[in-house]
Image (cartoon, rainbow, N blue to C red):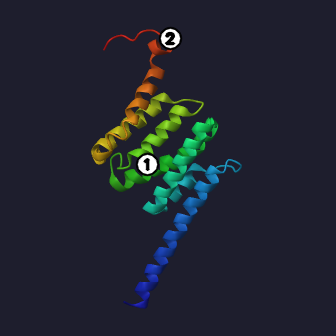
Amino acid sequence: LSDRFLLGKLRAKLIQENADTKLMGLVRDLIDTSKAPPSAGVIVSAILGASDDARRLAFYRVREFRRNCTSAGNLSNLNRLIPVLEGLIAADKSEYGGDGRFHRNHAQLAYIYKDRPEHSYDKAIELLSTAIKVRDSFAKNEIAYFRIYEFNRAFSRSKLDPSFIQNKKADAP
């Protein structure tokens, strides 16, 4: 192999490592609530340039932070995570087409819309419906485990049902 070829491979590897490091630094800054969150555009750009491994790690860090915020009642911090999950969804769609292949991105974003102080149940329902569709298309062996999506979608629908809100019996379908 020529030196030029090897140098090109090394350069490409360094560029990818820099892109991955940038994404992880942005996620670290996002999770550190003492810092101002990076802009959505910067986050999405970093996600689109990152490797699959870095995206996966970013997802797990964001999911863990979301769970911690939810269990500790720090729901106002959930909005910080929206750009990362939107970026992961955009990257997934651009690589695989349609709604992508990773249902968990949609579900985690739906949980944020459902749980944050300014609830967006309609958006949560839409995202959970997409998560269910993607899960059923690409992750058939995970359907039983991820039935929680249907529960959360039903919960969100109930919050939009006027009869439920007024504590009345719902009409039979």
Q: Residues within 10 Å of mark 2 (few under 14, many from 20)?
A: few
With 37 as the anchor, is 125 left or right in this view?
left
Q: Which mark is residue 166?
A: 2
Q: Residue at x 60, y 44 (%)?
A: 80
Mark 1 is on which residue type?
A: Ile
Under tag 2, what secondary structure?
Answer: loop
Q: Position of residue 127 (x, y in %)?
A: 42, 37
Q: Which quadrant would the C terminus be assigned to in this image? A: top left
In-image side of 137 versus 4 (left or right):
left
Q: Which quarter of the picture shows residue 29?
A: bottom right
Q: How many marks?
A: 2
Task: Look at the picture and state if 64 lies above or below 49.
Answer: above
In the rendered image, residue 19, in percent from the top left (x then y), is placed at 53, 66
Q: Nearer the viewer, residue 57 or 124?
A: 57
Q: Is residue 141 above or below residue 18?
A: above
Residue receiving disc 1: 89
